[in-house]
């Protein structure tokens, strides 16, 4: 690597600059500067998001949709504004198709228990993939136990890509739903989701996409994709924890029974009968995470300040740089070599357990994730109990890769002694 | 970081690379499984216990250096001990790695004391020991560290 390479990457300088928006990234760990490479677990938050939550409690706190007083009106407006912001992020046709939930996990459970439970029967089939996060497996297994439906699994090839030819054969007259991840959290693979939706729709089968790992790294257009449900978590998109979005096509959501019962989701209640509220409120029982939704709106605004082309170029060049630097390390095997991937690198080191790697890297200030990443079936597919995973975000730079690489070399030395 | 050198001592790495008493025990009369869901460490422990004395011990499994070395060292040190002595050793080891106790009386198991500086790794170090307790008590379901 030449000196010019290292110093004069425009996007790298940009990233160093963007980094200053994130106060936590100034921290030190074990007296070393923090190199945060666990972004697939959760991203750090820009100051704007932190301030938005704080300001909400300082100046706007009131319950939404309930009070006639001014504060309640302001809180309601801010909350609904966040919904419109999320609508634009996904390019949904209407803000009533945006349901605020706790996160991806709750979004998928909602679809499983409301849509799935009201429609699926014994003998029906749900198609998932081998690379799903547990949160896109377990809710469907629970649904299968309740209804007698069964799961069919799209396998993954050695590079970590879905075997689309097998998928085509899995679709049949029993298929009731396809639920796959847009981007894999341990492999980084970007799945051909438009193609998956098109094929499923040819069989009249709706598709849920798990967008947890996608929204911060790729532009998403649910109308262009034509997916039926799309789920994501705010905290992986530079937003707060405890807030996420379920997008659903209005026609499907309209026909779905409520998920939870309570306040806000009703129009009128008597002991004889309750009539339910319209979309999206029908699926938002109880006082929602108002501050979280507002924070999420601000996180999306923050992301909107960027030019997607510039962001994609930065993260892709970071990926190329990191893949090269990592493959140069003897004894290191990268798991996940898809042609289309985001900047997530899962790896194993010969003669070292990922858990030990994680501890030694932490000592160098480098935060990575080690373990099964809630992907136990996928780990089995690749014959490893766990991997180490470095996952990048817009504020990471080549410098972070360089520190990661020398920390890995240090770990190898510790184990060589 | 000197704590790291303390954690990954030569003896630990040696037992990780060449675990003693690895494999199954054909005539085992006590078997238990342990699982650490956080990192996926798994261990299956085989004991042969006669007249309340652990005559033989072997293990198989897949884990990090700390979990593997701890299991290997444990099998060495419990062989020939009475069950109650082995359980007392468990208490001492636990006290040493989790509570920062001196480790007096644990003999060469003292090499595990470095774990104390790494609270996230205590479960790795104690997995084999909890599994031994389950085996001695004939617990049929796998023990987990959660
Ligand atoms: C692909 C994928 N799906 C779902 C989830 C679950 O998200 P959450 O825990 O925010 O509900 C995650 C988060 O780890 C993920 O990576």
Image (cartoon, coloured by chain):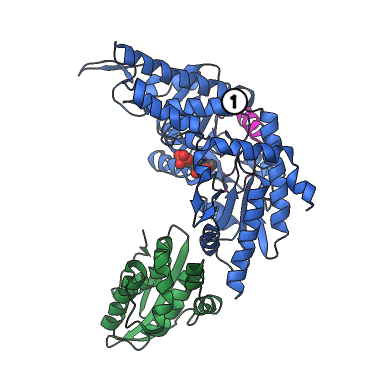
Chain colours: A blue, B green
Residue occupying image coordinates x 52% and y 21%: A85
Locate residue A89: give its quadrant.
Answer: top right
Residue B74 in the image: state x and y as whole percent.
40, 79
Q: Is residue A192 magenta?
A: yes
Label 1 Cα neighbours within 10 Å, binned few <14 / some 14-19 / many ≥20: few
Q: To which chain does the residue with label 1 belong?
A: A
Residue occupying image coordinates x 62% and y 45%: A188
Q: Label 1's element?
A: helix
Regarding residue A146, the answer to whether it shows in the image is: yes
Residue A416 in the image: state x and y as whole percent.
61, 74
Residue that badge 1 annotates: A304
Locate residue A183: give its quadrant.
Answer: top right
Residue A217 in the image: state x and y as whole percent.
61, 36
Depth order, front residue of A229/A36? A36
Q: Could you tell whether A121 is left or right of B18 in the image? A: left
The reply to whether the residue tagged 1 has its Cβ within 8 angstroms of ligand 1 is: no
How many numbered marks appear? 1
Residue occupying image coordinates x 51% and y 70%: B65
| Residue sticking out furthest to the left | A271
Q: Please tell me whether residue B25 is drawn above or below residue B121 in the rendered image.
A: below
Depth order, front residue of A256/B97? B97
Depth order, front residue of A178/A297? A297
Looking at the rendering, in which quadrant would you find the C terminus of chain B? bottom left
Q: Could you tell whether A345 is left or right of A212 in the image? A: right
Q: Give the range drawn in magenta.
A: A183-206
Q: Could you tell whether A381 is left or right of B114 in the image? A: right
Q: Does the magenta stretch include residue A259?
A: no
Residue B29 in the image: state x and y as whole percent.
35, 80
Regarding residue A204, the answer to whether it shows in the image is: no
């Amino acid at each position: 690597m030449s000196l010019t390479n290292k110093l004069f990457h425009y996007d790298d300088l940009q990233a160093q600059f963007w980094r200053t928006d994130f106060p936590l990234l100034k921290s030190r760990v074990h007296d070393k500067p923090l190199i945060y490479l666990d972004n697939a677990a959760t991203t750090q938050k820009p100051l704007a998001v932190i301030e938005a939550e704080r300001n909400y409690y300082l100046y706007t706190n009131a319950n939404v949709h309930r009070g006639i007083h001014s504060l309640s009106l302001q809180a309601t407006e801010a909350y609904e504004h966040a919904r419109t912001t999320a609508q634009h992020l996904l390019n949904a046709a209407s803000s009533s198709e945006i349901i605020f939930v706790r996160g991806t996990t709750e979004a998928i459970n909602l679809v499983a228990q409301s849509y799935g439970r009201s429609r699926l029967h014994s003998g029906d089939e749900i198609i998932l993939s081998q690379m799903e996060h547990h949160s896109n497996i377990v809710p469907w297994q629970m649904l299968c136990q309740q209804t007698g439906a069964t799961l069919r699994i799209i396998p993954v090839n050695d590079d970590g890509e879905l075997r689309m030819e097998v998928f085509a054969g899995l679709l049949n007259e029993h298929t009731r739903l396809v639920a796959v991840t847009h981007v894999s959290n341990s492999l980084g693979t970007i799945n051909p989701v438009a193609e998956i939706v098109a094929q499923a729709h040819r069989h009249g089968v709706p598709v849920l996409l798990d967008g947890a790992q996608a929204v911060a790294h790729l532009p998403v257009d649910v109308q262009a994709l034509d997916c039926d449900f799309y789920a994501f978590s705010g905290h992986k998109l530079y937003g707060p924890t405890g807030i996420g979005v379920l997008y659903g096509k209005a026609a499907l959501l309209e026909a779905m029974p409520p998920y939870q019962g309570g306040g806000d989701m009703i129009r009128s209640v008597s002991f004889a009968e309750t009539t339910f509220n319209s979309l999206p409120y029908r699926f938002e029982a109880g006082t929602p995470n108002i501050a979280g939704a507002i924070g999420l709106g601000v996180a999306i605004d923050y992301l909107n300040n960027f030019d997607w082309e510039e962001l994609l170029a930065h993260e892709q060049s970071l990926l190329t740089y990191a893949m090269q630097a990592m493959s140069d390390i003897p004894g290191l095997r990268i798991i996940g070599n898809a042609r289309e991937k985001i900047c997530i690198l899962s790896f194993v080191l010969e003669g070292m357990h990922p858990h030990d790697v994680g501890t030694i890297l932490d000592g160098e200030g480098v935060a990575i994730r080690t373990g099964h990443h809630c992907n136990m079936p996928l780990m089995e597919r690749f014959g490893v109990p766990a991997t180490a995973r470095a996952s990048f975000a817009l504020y990471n730079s080549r410098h972070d890769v360089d520190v990661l690489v020398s920390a890995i070399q240090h770990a190898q030395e510790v184990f060589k002694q | 970081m000197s704590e790291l050198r303390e954690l990954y001592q030569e003896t630990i790495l040696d037992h990780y690379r060449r675990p003693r008493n690895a494999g199954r025990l054909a005539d085992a009369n006590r078997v238990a499984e342990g699982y650490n869901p956080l990192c996926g460490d798994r261990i299956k422990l085989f004991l042969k216990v006669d007249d309340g004395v652990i005559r033989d011990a072997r293990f198989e499994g897949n884990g990090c250096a700390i979990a593997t070395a701890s299991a290997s060292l444990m099998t060495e040190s419990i062989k020939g001990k009475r069950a109650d002595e082995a359980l007392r050793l468990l208490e001492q080891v636990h006290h040493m790695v989790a509570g920062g106790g001196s480790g007096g009386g644990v003999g060469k198991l003292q090499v595990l004391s470095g774990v104390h500086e790494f609270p996230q790794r205590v479960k790795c170090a104690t997995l084999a020991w909890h599994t031994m307790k389950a085996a001695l008590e004939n617990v049929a379901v796998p023990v987990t560290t959660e």
